[in-house]
Image (cartoon, helix red, strand yellow):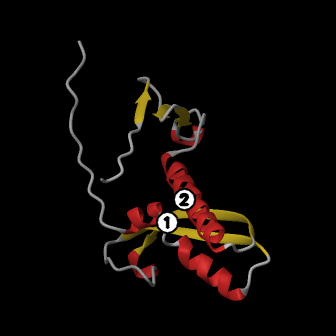
Amino acid sequence: MAKSTDVLVTSAVGGYAQTIRTRGHTLSADEPVAAGGTDIGPDPYELLLASLGACTSMTVQMYARQKGWPLAAVSVRLRHQKVHAQDCADCEKSTAFVDLIEKDVDLTGDLSTQQRARLLEIADRCPVHRTLTGQVRIRTSAVSPRA
């Protein structure tokens, strides 16, 4: 059976601040003040990068643990930008702009060169990475208005 994730995002009219609820957790999202928000939380792209970074770190940790490798810590730094397609050496699409996410993975521990190389390969196999680089379909539907 396929895994399903349920997230509810709500906002008040007039601002960009969002309340995000999932599995009993509450998070906030907003736009920076310069973009008209109140900056009470990360913006949507920061949340996307946080998701990818957390998934990458967790996946690398799980793999190292299964192998019994001496991984002490993982740090993932991510950056997002829109770049001209012709400036992107490994981009497949020829559209004017593409989204580029750069991911730097810092592995701490007494690891061999081969272990480090394998963990970097595993970093690109986390489920969120696969979702972002795979084929994604989003279906949007309207909910009946409340009385």
SS assignment at label 1 = loop
Looking at the rendered structure, which numbered label has been put on residue 55? Answer: 2
Residue ID at (73%, 85%): 112
Name the residue at 46% across, 60% down: 128
Name which residue type carries label 1: Cys
Furthest-bottom residue in this view? 114
The answer to which of 125 and 135 lies nearer the viewer is 125
Whole-percent x and y of residue 65? 65, 67
Horizontal and vertical percent position of residue 7: 41, 38
Residue position for label 1? 126
Q: Do the residues labelled 2 and 1 touch (CB within 8 Å)?
A: yes
Question: Mark 2 to mark 1: distance in Å?
Answer: 6 Å
Residue 9 in the image, given as x and y percentages of width and height: 42, 34
**Is 82 left or right of 50, judged from the image as shown?**
left
Residue 120 sits in which quadrant?
Answer: bottom right
Q: Nearer the viewer, residue 119 or 97?
A: 119
Figure quadrant of residue 97: bottom left
Q: Residue at x 25, y 17 (%)?
A: 146
How far across and down, in percent of the image, does residue 95 sit? 31, 72
From the viewer's perspective, is residue 11 above or below residue 48? above
10 Å crowding of disc 2: few (<14), some (14-19), many (20+) = many
Left or right, 79 with respect to 130, comes to right
Q: Which of marks 2 and 1 is nearer the N terminus?
A: 2
* Dot 1 crowding, Cα within 10 Å, few <14, some 14–19, many 20+: some
